[in-house]
């Protein structure tokens, strides 16, 4: 390991961070060409990084060689009733100079993590780019595990499923609110969501930015897909729509319902002028992890997670609470 100087990131480092992130994304685009999107320019990236460091109060660490930034990592401190105390490293939150080793990312994390722990944040998540395996290898070597898969399907390369069951696919309307409420059980069963998720499903039909497809047979709803318009972001292709939620009733799985919905969804999104569809799923959801890659979705980023035993705090001799309990 070469000699680095580590110090906390400040807004004065943003220009150097921009260059590292631009270079990282250009390398990502060699594998995922759609990564050269409308957000890949220094002004937009600099604005995003500045927001993290000034508005979101991110805490980050930079590694310097001869006064030049060789790599950085930053974490957004989140303390709320939904997620508790946690740190999130966003997709833009880690980059190293070309030619630097994966070990640098591990050392950056080792330098930054104590600051995050001082805020009581023992849950750490990171959005990890996948084109260059150095990032995945580094977080894997830090005991992070895959939690969520973020993937993209290129509509022009989609190969329709054949030999499907006789299932009718149609657009849902306001008259289908009760049906969508019942279908919400598909998601609550798989994701352990609260029972009131049904109300949110009913509201989807009144959302102008959402489009719902229903699969039916003999007048019974079997499954659904929900598409939603998506704004520009560094990890989102231009001309993309999000497949934000989908499901098939368990007793009808394996009968081609999801495949029929996918064929219909692709045709509809193509007619609307979209070139890409994005989606994400929990790695532990075996049905999703099996089905979406079959459709042609290709992972381009992982959300990885690590939980640190809170007993770490008591092992820290500088923790003031330790002083209070000493005999």
Image (spheres, helix red, strand yellow):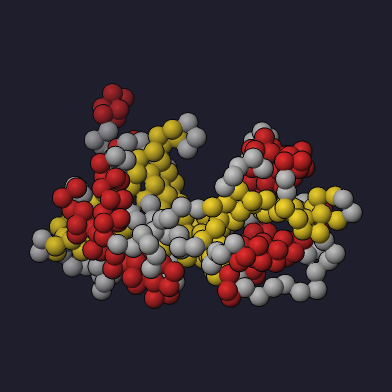
Q: In terms of image quadrants, where is residue 267?
A: bottom right
Image height of 116 relative to 26, above or below: above
Image height of 100 relative to 208, above or below: below
Where residue 44 appears, as percent x and y from the top left, is: 30, 55
Residue occupying the point 30% across, 62% down: 41
In the figure, is residue 279 to the left or right of 249?
A: left
Query: Can residue 253 be seen in this snapshot?
Result: no
In the figure, is residue 323 to the left or right of 209?
A: left
In the figure, is residue 68 to the left or right of 72?
A: left
The residue nearer to you, when weighing 147 against 307, is 147
Where residue 294 appears, as percent x and y from the top left, is: 65, 70
Residue furthest toward the left?
66
Q: Report the number of discs.
A: 0
Q: In terms of image quadrants, where is residue 34?
A: bottom left
Name the quarter where the C terminus is drawn: top left
Name the quarter where the N terminus is drawn: bottom left
The residue nearer to you, when weighing 302 against 298, is 298
Residue occupying the point 28% across, 50% down: 47
Where residue 144 appears, as percent x and y from the top left, is: 44, 56
Where residue 167 appears, as percent x and y from the top left, is: 82, 61
Residue occupying the point 68% across, 59% down: 287
Residue occupying the point 29% across, 65% down: 22
In the figure, is residue 88 to the left or right of 316?
A: right
Query: Can residue 279 be seen in this snapshot?
Result: yes
């Amino acid at each position: 390991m070469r000699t680095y100087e580590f110090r906390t990131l400040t807004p004065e480092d943003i220009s150097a961070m921009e260059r590292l992130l631009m270079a990282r994304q250009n390398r990502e685009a060699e594998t995922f060409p759609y990564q050269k999107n409308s957000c890949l320019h220094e002004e937009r990236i600099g604005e995003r990084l500045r927001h993290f460091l000034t508005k979101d109060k991110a805490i980050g660490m930079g590694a310097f060689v001869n006064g030049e930034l060789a790599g950085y990592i930053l974490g957004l401190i989140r303390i709320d009733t939904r997620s508790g105390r946690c740190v999130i490293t966003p997709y833009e939150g880690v980059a190293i100079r070309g030619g630097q080793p994966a070990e640098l990312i591990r050392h950056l994390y080792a330098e930054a993590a104590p600051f995050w722990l001082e805020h009581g944040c023992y849950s750490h998540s990171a959005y990890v780019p996948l084109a260059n395996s150095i990032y995945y290898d580094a977080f894997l070597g830090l005991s992070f595990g895959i939690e969520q898969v973020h993937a993209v399907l290129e509509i022009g390369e989609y190969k329709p499923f054949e030999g499907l069951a006789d299932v009718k696919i149609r657009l849902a309307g306001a008259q289908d609110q009760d049906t969508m409420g019942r279908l919400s059980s598909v998601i609550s069963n798989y994701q352990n969501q609260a029972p009131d998720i049904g109300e949110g499903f009913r509201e989807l039909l009144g959302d102008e930015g959402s489009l719902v497809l229903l699969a039916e047979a003999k007048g019974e709803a079997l499954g659904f897909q929900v598409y939603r318009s998506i704004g520009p972001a560094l990890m989102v292709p231009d001309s993309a729509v999000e497949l934000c939620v989908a499901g098939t009733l368990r007793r009808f799985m394996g009968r081609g319902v999801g495949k029929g919905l996918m064929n219909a969804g692709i045709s509809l999104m193509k007619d609307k002028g979209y070139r890409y569809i994005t989606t994400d799923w929990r790695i532990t959801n075996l049905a999703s992890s099996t089905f979406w890659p079959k459709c042609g979705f290709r992972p381009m980023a992982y959300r990885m997670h690590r939980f640190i035993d809170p007993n770490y705090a008591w092992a820290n001799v500088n923790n003031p609470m330790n002083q209070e309990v000493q005999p």
